[in-house]
Image (spheres, rainbow, N blue to C red):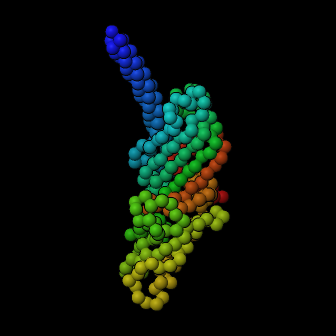
Amino acid sequence: MSSIVVKRKTARRAAWALGLAGVVGIAWIGDTMVASNVERKISDAVYESYAPESGNELATPPSVYVGGVPYLQALRSSQVPVVGVSALDVDVDGVGMVNTGVTLQGLKAEPNQVWSGDFLGAKAQSMRRTLRLDGVAMGAWLDMKDLTISHPKNISPGGGTATEAVFQGRPPGFHEPVSVLATLRLVGDEFQLRPKEVISSSVHPDDADDDALAAFDLTVNTTTLPLDKAADAVYLEGGSIVFEAVRNNVIVQPEYLAPVGSTSEF
């Protein structure tokens, strides 16, 4: 008799556990669906509204991520941890094809904004905008069509971040490519690419190294970049040079989620 009672209790506990798991699973699926719907709405809005003066539209809708696990906890906290928008192959005048991103952190959001994804007018603790230039875009600045960029110490695809980079390309007037180690730094509003040494070269004249180093010397005023302000940081990541600008305590405007910001050059 006691064994029957034990079996019944075990069965009830198992049923309760399964029921709880089902409720949690349904809630998780519902939360995921709401977050995905918000991401899609933001992506569609950005894609449809982006109309640069050059007339270059986005090739594909941008990727959007809204943070929070679960996302709908923002209904109680009134805060969405992060909203990120990233776009690939954006044609930027004066720069070329780049990958861009904007991240809003710590959004103070009303319940209707959490449901709809319309965060216009919400206050964000910070807004970070990034511009990623690969070898093609940097090569246009340096007048080298075959430029590649790599980490000086880590050759893996990710490679981590670095403030130095190895540039390999064929400078104008050279018949063979050369590899140069260069530093990436900001001095005031200026980005300065300064070559340190020639790592490899098949060019033999004594003055060839000096010419090679000079070919990789570059200065760019970052207020001319569409970051809304001068760059706050520059670094190598994943084979691209990344420019980053951060603004604190912003009220979200429609243009803040656009793939590129405005220039701040006067």
Q: Residue 35: x, y in percent?
A: 47, 33
**Which residue is at the front of the view, 5 or 263?**
5
Left or right: 158 with respect to 105?
left
As drawn, 63 above or below 159:
above
Left or right: 3 with respect to 116?
left
Q: Residue 19: x, y in percent?
A: 40, 19
Q: Residue 54: x, y in percent?
A: 48, 52
For the question of whether residue 37 can be seen, the reply is: no
Image point 43% across, 90% down: which residue? 205
Q: Residue 142: x, y in percent?
A: 48, 70
**Which residue is at the front of the view, 72 or 256?**
72
The quarter of the picture where the C terminus appears is: bottom right
For the question of whether residue 238 can be seen, the reply is: yes
Image point 56% across, 50% down: which residue? 129
Q: Residue furthest front?
A: 2
Image point 55% across, 40% down: which residue? 82
As drawn, 50 above or below 155:
above
Q: Quadrant of residue 175?
A: bottom left
As drawn, 244 above or below 20:
below
The quarter of the picture where the N terminus appears is: top left
Q: Residue furthest bottom?
A: 206
